[in-house]
Image (tube, rainbow, N blue to C red):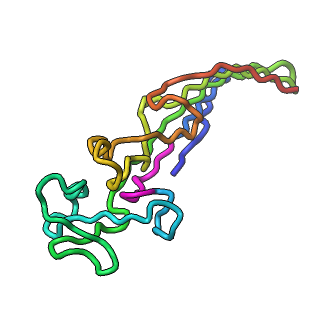
Amino acid sequence: MTVSGIVDLPKGFQLSPILQFGSARPYNLTNSSNTLNTGGGTATAVVVPTNDPTNYLAFKGNNTGAQNCFYGLNGVAQGCTIAKYDPLRGDPFFELDMRLAKNIRFGERMNLQLLAQAFNLTYRANYGNNFGPSATANIASAATFGHPQGFIAPASTIIPHALWGELGVRFTF
């Protein structure tokens, strides 16, 4: 959802806030570019214990002494099941931008507008659903499973935690 507006202030000033909000989106445990496992990516299922279906790393390499779960043509071994599709949610998106403008009129048709804009006033990193690596990745990456891999930047930032601004001039005649 995006909410914006323009507030006319005294002495020719204008204030324009833009608030953007997006709910947390689900993401796949194995490969977000192959969401239906139809052959474009890993085509790997995440096997979990039946009594703990949210323990996505329980059988990671089977080095914990847990029973061996096998997913193949005959299904899944007893005591194991396949994790639900897109069971995790990323982070909600929130960004507040603001613009302050001062209009200076020259005659009836000319206007000089001085602009100051600030982006990401809340100084928030928006990761969305870009998490990983996958639950089926190698053992060394298990420690970073579920941690952000990138961020959403609709305002074209290059740093996740970034508060920056712009100054500008517009002349119309």
Please tell me whether residue 23 belongs to the stretch shown in magenta: yes
Q: Is residue 158 left or right of residue 105?
A: left
Q: Is residue 109 left or right of residue 78?
A: right
Q: Residue furthest bottom?
A: 74
> Residue 7 in the image: x percent, y percent?
59, 34
Which region is colored magenta? 20-31
Q: Evaluate whether residue 49 shows in this view.
A: yes
Q: Residue 125 or 109: which is nearer the viewer?
A: 125
> Residue 126 in the image: x percent, y percent?
44, 40
Count of numbered badges drawn on the protein: 0
Q: Which quarter of the figure is the C terminus placed in?
A: top right
As drawn, 72 above or below 59: below
Q: Evaluate whether residue 26 shows in this view.
A: no
Q: Residue furthest left?
A: 65
Q: Residue 89 or 136: which is nearer the viewer?
A: 136
Q: Is residue 126 left or right of residue 114?
A: left
> Residue 42 in the image: x percent, y percent?
45, 60
Going 47% across and 29% down the picture, which residue do you hit?
A: 121
Going 33% across and 57% down the picture, which residue do you hit?
A: 88
Q: Is residue 154 left or right of residue 63?
A: right
As drawn, 2 above or below 8: below
Q: Residue 65 or 111: which is nearer the viewer?
A: 65
Res. 50 image quadrant: bottom left
Please tell me whether residue 100 belongs to the stretch shown in magenta: no
> Residue 161 in the image: x percent, y percent?
44, 28
As drawn, 81 above or below 119: below
Going 48% across and 26% down the picture, which residue do you hit?
A: 162
